[in-house]
Image: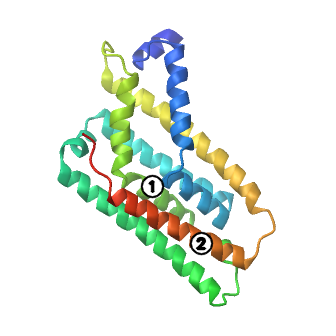
Amino acid sequence: MTASGVLVGLGLAGPQELLLFMTAVFVLNATPGVDLLLTVSRTLQGGARAGATAALGISTGCVVHALAAAFGLAALLAVSSAAFAAIKWLGAAYLLWLAWGMARTAWRGAAGSAAPAASKSVSAWVDYRTGLVTNVLNPKVALFFLAFLPQFIAAATPDKTLAFLGLGVIFVVQGTLFLLAVVALAARLRRLPSSPRAARWLHGVGAVLFAALALRLASARAAT
């Protein structure tokens, strides 16, 4: 199949549409939010491995949302206020739980912990699970896929499900590469001289930001 045939299969009119789509994805990935904040915070706290593992969890969550959008499951969140509210409150509760954990770490450090808080590490599975759950339990991501991807799929596209999946693959791959680049940058910053006090401050700020994101998610309304 030719390159133009692949673009048609994706629902894109041509290379210009692909460039526009990838540019829009980059802007969306670079917009500060839960995924970006989690990736940066885990890298600064646990190193490049922790940040990269959390990023892979986030990417897996995006795969789940892309599949849901492709097969119409995400449409349920757009029409059912009960379903949207259930996922919204679960996501907000999970973010608050993460914020509480960061606040406890900051407080224990302030009480005289011998080890710097930023050096505390957790298993790769925990980092992966955290990235996955925070992404999957964010209904705004599902609605984003449902609202964003169709804008780049032409009405005459023969197989719209395949087009959804194709654009979803591009989104996930590009988003994963972006987050890994963020991990590399944050890991370099982590090598700078630090102190236990700075580590406690990092956890404290992270707790406040995650709590704020939880409140923002809790106040979100379903798209009309």
Task: Count neighbours of disc 1 (C-alpha within 10 A) and say few if under 14, some if 14 to 19, many if 20 or more.
Answer: many
Label of residue 3 in the image: none
Name the residue at 35% across, 44% down: 142
Give the residue type at disc 2.
His
Residue nearer the viewer, 140 or 49? 140
Q: Residue at x 55, y 52 (%)?
A: 36
Q: Quarter of the image holding residue 22? A: top right
Coloration of the structure image: rainbow
User: Which circle, 2 or 1, is nearer the viewer?
Assistant: 2
Residue 219 spot, x, y in % from top left: 32, 58
Q: Is residue 50 visible?
A: no
Q: Earlier in the sequence, mark 2 or mark 1?
A: 1
Q: Is residue 29 above or below residue 204?
A: above
Where is mark 1, residue-wise? Answer: 132
14 versus 146 height, above or below: above
Mark 2 is surrounded, within 10 Å at the Cα level, by few (under 14), some (14 to 19) or many (20 or more) other residues, namely many
- Tell me residue 151's x, y (percent): 37, 25
Residue at 53% from the left image edge and 42% from the top image edge: 29
What residue lies at 49% left-to-right and 12% top-to-bottom?
14
Local secondary structure at mark 1: helix
x, y (%) of residue 135?
A: 43, 52
Q: Looking at the image, is 86 positioned above or below residue 73?
A: below
Locate the C terminus and report the quarter of the image it occupies: top left
The three-letter amino acid code for the residue at tag 1 is Leu
* Residue 203, label in figure: 2
The correct choice, above or below, for 75 with respect to 45 in the image is above
